[in-house]
Amino acid sequence: MKIEKSVLTVMALISVGLPFSAWSAENIDTAAQGATVIVDQLWSDTALPINWFMNDQGVTNNNSTGVGPGNISAADAAIQVTNAFNQWQTVTTAGISANYSGTTVVDDIGCDYVNLMTWADDIIPFDTPDFQDVIAIGFAFSYVGPDIVLDPVAGIANPANNRNLSEVSDAGLGCAPLANAAIYPDGSVLESGTIIDADMIWNPIQFDYDIAANASEDIVHIESIATHEVGHLLGVSHTSLAFAANDPATMFPFVDTTNVVLQNNIATLAADDEMAVGRSYPGTGFYPGGVGVATTGQITGWVRQADGSPAQGVRLWAYDASLPAGAATPPVYEAFSATTFDAESGVNAGDYSFRGIPPGDYYVCILPWENLIPGNGPDAPERYNSTTLNGSGHTGFMTECFDDAPSATNAPDFAEEDRLRQVSVSAGETTSSINFVTGQQAANIMLVMDRSGSMNLGLPAPLMGTKIEALRSAAHLFIDFMDLDGGHNVGLVQFESVVVPFAPSFNLQPIDLTSVGDAHTAIDSIMAGGLTNIIDGVNEGINQLVSGGSPNHRPLMLLFSDGRHNSPAGSDLNTIEGPLLANEVKLYSVGFGSDVDGAILAPIALNTGGLHIENPDVASDALRKHFLAIASSAADSTAIIDPYYELKHGQSVSLDVPVNSSEKDVTFTAFWDEQNENLFDITLTSPRGCTVQTRLNTHGVTVRKYHTHRLIKVTPQYRCGFFRDLTGTWKMNVRNIGDQHLAGINIAAYGNTTTHIFAEVTTTEKEETVLDVSIVAEGERVKRANVYADIILPVSSTGDSQEQDYAQDGRVDPIKPQAEERTLRISLNDRGNNGDEKAKDGIFSGRVPVDIIGTYPVHIYAQYIHDDQKGSRELISSYHFNGKYVIE
């Protein structure tokens, strides 16, 4: 237990070999079977009651701080520790018992089968920096090895009947032969993880103690600290539950010696502490595994990542739903999801269970570690047990509550009543399938934009406008999408030969209704000129990500450039990779031209976990699609459908958008070229037939408009009449009402969803280059789908980007052949042939071309059926061929 104000109590369990199985919260556990599994450390029933002893010297040197009350007798100290044991053994649903067996002359810790409480230990160096801030240490020694049946017959020849534990485990730990049958009688079975000795060692040098409930700072109440340490000696680990500043659970790892209220409160067990000890030693009414009529139940489920892999060591909290919902409502119980190392039969990685939970209604939530809840330090997974320490996928996602109720803050948000679902528990029953798919945390995003001289050039005929205007339109769209999603921080950087500050500046900051107007103003101010210094632009973006923003948001960078890095002369663009990786910045790179640094940027983006996309045709609509694809990835959204239409004046089109139950909300997007926000009349028709206007915000509908786009976000709060109306087939209705005879419009829908589409280009054992696509719905791969992809073949570099930086006017020459003529459509299958390695595994594959050096943009389309619901997904991706191998 760490104590704030630099005071620390430590729990440690020493294993005499290796462990019972562990997978839920708050069991002390350790590695077993050659460090291949994790098991719990517990006392066996045959060792109960646990007989413990007090060193006969009592509390010595009890005025080291000058405010101590003087030495305390062994008898008085024993009463304090007895009270601490009583807190645990009086828990009705736990079958644990202990007995004070008197004083002993033994004063040092050791595996001697004397369960010792001592202030006279000479082994722990409390006068050294490593231990001077430690109040007490709970040591428990556990047997680890194959199951053995204890028998008086000892000897190496028959280890199955052996009390000489040093012969079958690590003798270096100092454990004597287990000759005392009073601890574990003949016939006792020692399973891996069985505790065989437990000692509690107190620091007599830096701290003073008292036997009364504390009213003085810097005086340690023995019973309070002992109650926590006894939990450890029983095999109970830490919990991260803190219900208020002065009222954590007993097994919370921190206590402040100057906070007497907090210190006194931990002397009384919280409900989570009681559930934890019942889980280890099921007693009367505990379910499952207890005795008598069950008075409690359990909640079970799993936590998976978006790609379907298990999220391991994730923290789950259960809240009492009968309490007033709000940020101040404290959680009541904690659990951790299992890892691949957990040994319990029938438990898979990612599974979790709240066992022994009283009947009632609960909100169940997942919280990532390292998100400052409940504070800087207590939320570090290494402070708990081996399950959290060996977890994966247990950080970097958004806090959310069942069912799909994400929070824009680190703590759960109970304001989303339309998304919250209460979980009911009955005595003697399991409430199952309370499952989670982790979403991503909010992001710190730097939009780093090239404004070099070549951006003055006009788009290739017949497109209208310049490259700088195309960039502004894409950046406006990106900003509004991130604002509409909510909770993100965005910063803007523009560069040419040097980084050019915006006036006024728009450094990394929350993007919301207050700041979004300033962002649009800054984007409109971008003017072209100068050479191309990508390195300085990227470094400025990294500096802002490191120095500003929210510490628990994901750092992302969208780098836009229309040409190669060329300033200062001789500088090496490869140098950006180190700082990006060192600061864990995910890079999304967009090349907008026929002479860009794809050979460098593609592998760098991949190494950071991002993506490099190229647009050699300098098409403005494709650029906006690329920016939207990156924005949706940052917002943890997935494209549902994404078509393009050309409409004559007065002509209409209606797009069906299937929205299934996996969507948390849906954002409909439309963008066009002419600077006229009234060029199109846009409405939505809900599944129940209600018409949604898209010019003003209404209940459950939020709108963002700009000259060349409109975004409409529909949430579960939307109602058609008296009914919620998110799931089903929506219609997006568009009519050309402008002056142009013919106008093009891209319309799309993005779902904030638990159904995602993933793509990867790989080389098979047959040396075929294939595109693998999987759709993962609610943590499971979809098996029924129709999948195909459009791949645009690259073109040879024109080598003229620096020359274009000096241009003051003119137009980009069209690329020939044009993109439409370079597009190859391939079908993907899951039949085990034509590039697909295994049939019916939910991975749809097809061979892809790798004939030309360069970047291959890929647009993937999928229609699927899952749980009898139809859906669609689209994904923009790419791969790069360097002449030898594919970079994806």
Image (cartoon, helix red, strand yellow):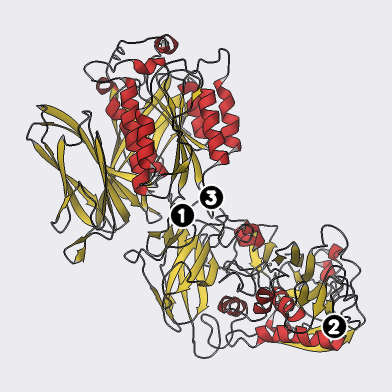
**Residue 462, located in which quarter of the rendered image?**
top left
Q: Amino acid at mark 3?
A: Asn
Q: Nearer the viewer, mark 1 or mark 3?
A: 3
Q: Which residue is located at x 56 percent, y 12 percent? A: 569
Residue drawn at the location 59% of the way across and 32% of the way down: 579
When asked about the image quadrant of residue 723, the answer is bottom left
Q: Is residue 260 above or below residue 769?
A: below
Q: Secondary structure at mark 2?
A: strand
Residue 573 appears anywhere in the view: yes
Q: Which is in the foreground here, disc 1 or disc 2? A: 1
Residues under labels 1 and 2: Cα distance?
48 Å
Most distant residue in the bottom direction? 292
Query: Label 1 sits on what residue type?
Result: Met
Q: At 18% across and 30% down in the image, what residue appears?
A: 744
User: Which residue occupies the foreground of this view, 300 or 185?
Assistant: 300
Q: Which mark is residue 552?
A: 3
Helix, strand, or loop for circle 1? Answer: loop
Comes first in the chain, label 1 or label 3: 1
Q: Please give the residue where the numbered disc 1 appears in the rendered image.
A: 398
Whether label 3 touches label 2, CB < 8 Å: no
User: What type is the residue that disc 2 sits on?
Assistant: Met
Q: Which mark is residue 178?
A: none
Q: Quadrant of residue 205?
A: bottom right
Image coords of residue 770 (percent x, y): 40, 33
Instruction: Quickly name the residue at label 2.
Output: 54
Give yes or no for contact between labels 1 and 2 (Cβ–Cβ under 8 Å).
Answer: no
Q: Residue furthest left?
A: 650
Considering depth in this image, is 33 or 476 the residue closer to the camera? 476
Residues at marks 3 and 2, CA–CA distance in whole angstroms? 46 Å
Q: Where is 180 relative to 787, above or below?
A: below
- At x 50% / y 15%, what residue is drawn? 566
Q: Secondary structure at mark 3?
A: loop
